[in-house]
Image (cartoon, rainbow, N blue to C red):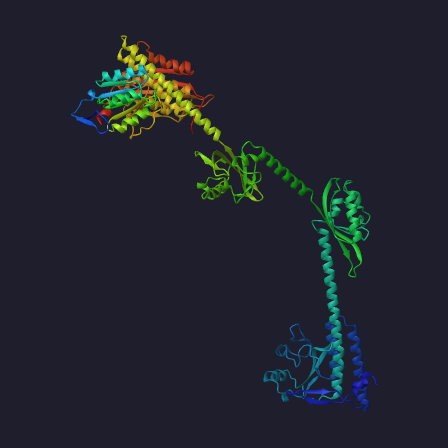
Amino acid sequence: MTPSSSLLSQAPKTMRDSAGFISRQESTRELSNPQALLSRVDELSILFRLTDRLYRAQSLDEVYEAALDAILGTLDCGRASVLLFDRSGTMRFVAWRGLSDIYRTTLEGHSPWKAGDERAAPIFVEDIRDTQESELVKTTIESEGIRALAFIPLVSKGGVIGKFMVYYSRPKQFIDHEADLAITIARQVGFAIERARAEEARQLAEENLRESQERFRTMLEHAPVMIWISGPQGECIHLNKALRSFWAVEEAAVAAFDWRCTMHPDDAPQIGKLMMNALATQTQVTIRGRYANASGEYRVLVTEATPRFTMSGEFQGMIGVNVDVTDRERADKALRDSEARFRLAVEAAPSGMVLSDQSGRIVLANAHAEHLFGYDHGELVGKPVEALVPKQFQIAHPAFRRDYKTQPTARPMGVGRDLTAQRKDGSEIPVEIGLSPIEAAEGLMVLTAVVDISERKRADLQRNLLLAELDHRVKNTLAVVQGIAHQTFKGTNASAGARSAFEGRLVALANAHNLLTNSSWSSALLSEIAADALQAKAMNRLRVTLDGPQILLKPKEALSLAMALHELSTNALKYGALSNDMGRVTVTWETTSGSPSRLRIKWQEQDGPAVRPPKSRGFGSNLIEMTIVQDLDGTVELDFQREGLICTVEVPITTGQLR
Amino acid sequence: MHLKYGGPKGDFVQTASASIGTATILVAEDEVLIRFMTAEDLRRAGYTVLEAGNAADALTLLRSNTPVDLLLTDIRMPGSMDGAELASVARELWPAMKIIVLSAYPPQPPTPEIVDGFIAKPYDPRLFLTRIKELLKR
């Protein structure tokens, strides 16, 4: 008995399930009617075509179409559909004939089985009205003009994957033969769906693989690093664009290209040894070496090579990446050299040098600094800079550091203040400190130069003591001279005025000494010299106007100008603008540009007694001329105007105007 | 009102309105030429002037019950005591007596507890006498 004749002989065995559906089990019966025999021949023919079409189907859609054709051709139903479980386990229409959208939409998901059920049997509904289905289902089915229908499970690998349905517009008694046909078609279709799905999966996998390989090839070709593939013996199989460009090798010439000839002769033995070992042991290797590029320039390449194997584990050669580290190594070396030079410069500096990082930690200190602060070699590194700050300032110091970061410029620290630093033993030393910001990869660093000024302080103190002693002696000598003059004048006919003039000059000289002593005999301010000459004589200060920039005078300039201004003020007190109650004296000065610059002082008297030019030159005039013209190489102009004396003094000065 | 001091600490007599020119001034100065000049300037102005060539002599004079209104002393003088020490001792013993330092040292801010003024050497005689007069008026 052939399978098909066996199917044809199946007899119906009806069972009704709890929902009112009828399940039919196979039974056999004989065919004796010739018409029926012909009909069976047609069915076999349709089944044969189904088998053939399913065998040739290239897609699931072709499977569905063949299935629907066979169902409609053999089961005389007029309408049919194929439904499959989707990934979520919902039964969905995948192909149909003669069904409305509303019907499919409403009943999609309706299934008597769950995906994967292993004991699913066909279900035949002779009249939907006789079932216990919901009214919605019944109404939907009847509205579609369907009264009878059958659920035929599609099985793959022992579990339900879907079903096909046949629909009849009238109630129908299903016979065993129809059930046999349906099951036969379902078996074929289930198998075909399984096969088509597997084929589609295979094609998808192949497509994915092709795309993956294409992507890999594209990445390989256009990667910004040099990539190569070799055979088991190290022979060149592939060079990507970057590597071909490095060696100027055409793509077609890659197989014949011998990269070994580009190796630097000094590096070739080591490179060869490492690469041969990696090939022999089929292991990963990293090689650094110099290779000549297309221009003949040796570049340093770091090669990372990894063995390649087939799926079965057969060694196929190596795949490697070459990275040109020439520029990086040069930059690293330049940086190292720069750092080494910096360290040498710091170490050789004649003062203590301390480099601190953003957090205020000391990262470098030269031997001078270690000695200065009493630390052993290397002991300062890692300590906070506050370790070098006197205790009373340690808490506030981090805030000073933060302030410095907001305006990091090279500048001295604590201008105008006496700075001290703390040594390891807690003692303090007077210092001068210079700060310099250094921009580094780690952030802003600060280079601090520290100079121990203990010796300078001692020297300054000593010098000041000597100056004070000298000043004392000079002025004591002047006082003795004053005493001698006093005794001398006493025995002569000299007037009291003569003694007074003499003593006044001595006092003016002593006062100028005082001003110079205050600045350790470095300089004196013209404004103070002038004020001393005029205002210190207890004159009405409102009658004296001094106006000019702050000019620093060297000692010789200060003494000479003090004497000249003293003579002018003495003259004004005796005969000029200050000899009455109304007169005024205005002293103005300015500097002119040039080298050396010149100082011009204008003495102008007003509202004093009417001035008459002197008939002869007195000692005062001579003294002014001697000090200004001869001592200072300047000029003096005395203009005895009726309204008041105008004296213009112009001298070269070597110091200058304070800003 | 004018105070005259004739003895150690607190031992003083009050005299009625002694004129400025009649005050007694002790000049302690080792440089004889300067001391002569200063003493003469003061005498010409009407003061009674006592002279001492060092601090020890000045202290002896002060302790001799000679009434002194003003001690005018140099700082640097020979002997075991200098002018600064003399001023301190004098201030301690005769707290109301005026004391002026007359020195060639750079002028220092006066220390009111010890001295009442400072006059730099060499001095302007006119300004010098004005300062003396003003101090004795206080």
Q: Nearer the viewer, residue A45 or B95?
A: B95
Q: Is A305 positioned to the left or the right of A617 in the image?
A: right
Could you tell me which residue is drawn at 32 percent across and 12 percent down?
A484
Q: Is residue A447 above or below residue B106?
A: below
Which part of the image, by quadrant, shows the N terminus of chain A? bottom right
Q: Nearer the viewer, residue A37 or B48?
A: B48
| Count of numbered circles in the view | 0
Which image quadrant for residue A466? top left
Could you tell me which residue is drawn at 72 percent across and 56 percent down?
A216
Outermost residue on the top side: it is: A492
Outermost residue on the left side: it is: B16
Q: Is A438 positioned to the left or the right of B80 in the image?
A: right
The picture places residue A376, in percent across and down from the top left corner, at: 56, 38
Which part of the image, by quadrant, shows the C terminus of chain A? top left
The picture places residue A291, in percent across and down from the top left corner, at: 75, 43
**Residue A525 visible, this orientation:** no
The picture places residue B81, in percent across and down from the top left corner, at: 33, 23
The picture places residue A268, in percent across and down from the top left corner, at: 78, 43
Q: Nearer the viewer, residue A542 or A181?
A: A542
**Residue A361 visible, this orientation:** yes
Q: Nearer the viewer, residue B67 or A16?
A: B67
Q: Is residue A180 above or below residue A211?
A: below
Could you tell me which residue is drawn at 29 percent across and 30 percent down?
B113
Which image quadrant for residue A134? bottom right
